[in-house]
Structure formats: structure tokens, C-alpha cells
Amino acid sequence: MTLRKFAGLGALLSLVMPSLAMAADEVAAPVLNSGDTAWMLTSTALVLFMTIPGLALFYGGMVRSKNILSVMMQCFAITGLISILWVIYGYSIAFDTTGMEQGVVNFNSFFGGMGKAFLAGVTPSSITGPAALFPEAVFITFQMTFAIITPALIVGAFAERMKFSAMLIFMGIWFTLVYAPIAHMVWSGNGGLMWDWGVLDFAGGTVVHINAGIAGLVACLVLGKRKGFPTTPMAPHNLGYTLMGAAMLWVGWFGFNAGSAAAANGTAGMAMLVTQIATAAAALGWMFAEWVTHGKPSALGIASGVVAGLVAITPAAGTVGPMGALVIGLAAGVVCFFCATTLKRKLGYDDSLDAFGVHGIGGILGAILTGVFAAPALGGFGTVTDIGAQVWIQIKGVGFTVIYTAIVTFIILKVLDAVMGLRVTEEEESVGLDLAQHNERGYNL
């Protein structure tokens, strides 16, 4: 009888245990969170809104009327080009983790594998995120919008003088050899070069802004100055467009920064708050610096200050507190004002729309100050206990990005210049790129 009881118990367990195992699997399986998914869908749309129409209008208003369509066309064409390259191989280069190992520096520390090329394995049920809470398709599109706006920012440095064909090829190669690898090094996780260093870049101060700003500086130096610069007046033709574009960037940036929390949580809420504080402080900082220096505050100045503040808070948005954001914003507004005006005038380079002065300088400043104000001792929410050590890590990240981006960008531009030429002719530049490159006019008056 006893043996029969044990035999019966064994039979019962053999039936129950698979069910228990299945239940455990079900509990452990990732479950899509509709709130996080909704926020990431919204953030993705906001970041795309930053490029088209935000950046297109912001830059379009600052050029002369004969070049407005060329700048807007470049923003739209880059959006299309990078979207396709991202799908084919960009996402894989940036985020495939094949061959990566924490603390080990190898090829995959710099360059992702091809396991996600052509979005292999991505289905409607693929889930990603910090706790696997939203569809991978949403993450892919969200990161795609970052990849789109970064090369589009470079346009501001060489506006009004680069051939459209050369621009397209340059952007495709630059995205492949510069943007995607830098994104991989900073954001791919354990085994990524700058990730392992401990570089803090919450939403793209290094990946997006320093990257684009340095590339823009190199591009404007390689192409040379616009015809007549700096003696011929080249005032913005429609500051109304620029202000509207700046406003769109300000609104869209909440998706950029708060969306980088990759969840609808407290980090996203704080990122939104500090973004608003820093941007407002930078707008006022630039405005008052200009007012004191030149006697009058300008619409172009406050719009530029807005963007400077947005840029500087980007790497810090997930780790700094409100007072840290206030300091970062004020510093960005004042420092970027003097770099975009006094420094550019003294050194004589023709950064047409201040891509380097705002994005390069603002990104560097924000990245370094992130190491300071992420510390809980200064009101931050990071894990920084040794401010000096973290600032050194941030400086290393900035230095590596500046050197890598400058060298590779220079090589790409020089090769393209030798093969197909970069600049339009003097006659085409005088006529304007709208007519010369696209056979259209922005205005028919």
C-alpha cells in the first residue's frame, strides 16, 4: 500500500511539474508594457519632428532667400537616405553586440556585428528596452530618428556652397564610418569602448552633437568660405521661419531627452523637467550676453540660445537635477554666444549657421559638466561619487570623439573632393543653390 502511494505521488508530480515549469516560464517571459510603448511611439514622432520640419525651418530661415529650398531639400533627402541605410546595416553596426565582452577591447568594441543587418529577426513580437517592455520595432525607429538628425545638423556648417550630389554621398559614408560606430561605442552596452570607460551620455551629447559639430567644423574648413564672406552681408532672410523652427526643436526635444529613458517613468519625468530648465536658462543667458555686448537682444540670438541649452543638457538629462540643469543652461547660453560670434570672427572660419559654435561647443560643455552635476552631492541622480574621476572620463570621451570624427570626416571629404568635387561653381553660388541645384525658387514674387 505504501509503495502504491509513492507511485501515485510520483505520477501526480510527473503531471504537475511540467505545468509548474510552464508557469515559471510564463512569469519570466517579458511582457509588453502599453504605457512604455505609447511613450516611445510619441517620443519617436517628436524626434522626427525635430528634423522635418523643425531643423529644416530653423536652418532655412537663416540662409539667404536664394538658398532656402536647398537647405530644406538637404534635410528631407538626409531623412530618406539615413532611414534606408539604418534598416540595411546602420542599426546592426550601432546595436548588434556580437563579439562584445566587457573589459575586452576588440573590433566589436568599435563596430557592431552584422547580425541585425536588414533587420534580421525583427518581428511584431520582438520586444526590447531596459526590462523588455516595448517592441523592438519602436526602438529601431526611435534610434533611426537620432541617426537622421545628426548628419542633418552638419548641413548648417556648409550651407549655401556644397553640391547636392556630393552632400548625399558624403552623408551616406559619414553615417557609416562615423555616426554608427560612435553610437555603438557609447550606447551598445558592455563591451562598447566608451560604455566600458563609463562615459555618461544619456541622449546624445557625444553621439549626436559633438559628432555633428566637429564634422561641421571640418567640412566648412575643407570647403572654404562662401563667396564674399565675411565682407558681403549675408543676413538671415526669414527669422520668422527660424523662430518657428527653434520652437519645434524645443518641443521635439522632450522626445529626444525624456524618450531616452526608454520608459514612461521617473527618469523620463526628470529628464523633461531639466530639459525645460536648461533651455530657458540658455535662451536668457544668450539673450542677455548679446544685449550687454551689442546693445540689443535679437530674435536670432534667443533662438540660438534655445538650441544651445537643448544641446548642452542632452548628455546630462538622465542624471542631473534641476539646479545642475540651471547652471548647465546658463553656461551654454553664454559660452556658445561668444564662441558663435567672437571666436568665429577672430579665427575666420565660415561655419554658416553655427553648427560647430552651438552643437560642437554646447555638446562638449554639456558632456563635461555632466560629470560634475550627475553627482548626488550636487543634486544629481547618477552614481558619481568621485567628481574629478568622472570629469576625466567625460573628457576622455570628448577627446576620442573629437579626434576620431575630425580625422575620418577629413579623409572622406578630401577623397570625395578629388573624385567628384564638393563645391558648386562660383556662378552657381551667385545664382543660388535653389536654381542651380534644383531648378526651383523658394519664392516667386
Image: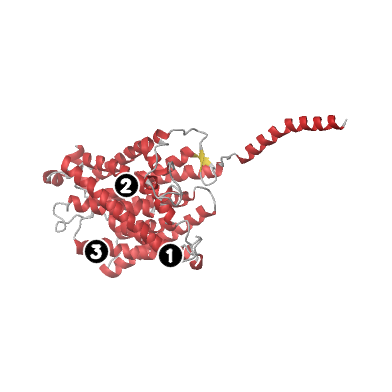
- CA gap between label 1 and label 3 equals 30 Å
For the residues bearing labels 2 and 1, Cβ distance under 8 angstroms? no
In the image, taking residue 307 as reference, residue 24 lies left or right, namely right
Residue drawn at (32%, 52%) of the image: 211
- Examine the rendering and report whether any part of residue 322 can be seen: yes
Residue 387 locus on image (x, y percent): 45, 66
Q: Which residue is mark 2?
A: 178
Query: Which one is in front, 101 or 42?
Result: 101
SS assignment at label 3: helix
Extreme-right residue of the structure: 1
Q: Which residue is mark 3?
A: 343
Residue 389 tag number: 1
Extreme-bottom residue of the structure: 292
Residue drawn at (29%, 39%) of the image: 77
- CA gap between label 2 and label 1 equals 27 Å
- Examine the rendering and report whether any part of residue 237 can be seen: no
Q: Is residue 291 above or below residue 178?
A: below
> How is the rendered protein coloured?
secondary structure
Q: Earlier in the sequence, mark 1 or mark 3?
A: 3
In the image, taking residue 302 as reference, residue 343 lies left or right, namely left
Extreme-front residue of the structure: 3
**Which of pointers 3 and 2 indicates the residue nearer the eye?**
2
Residue 272 locus on image (x, y percent): 47, 55
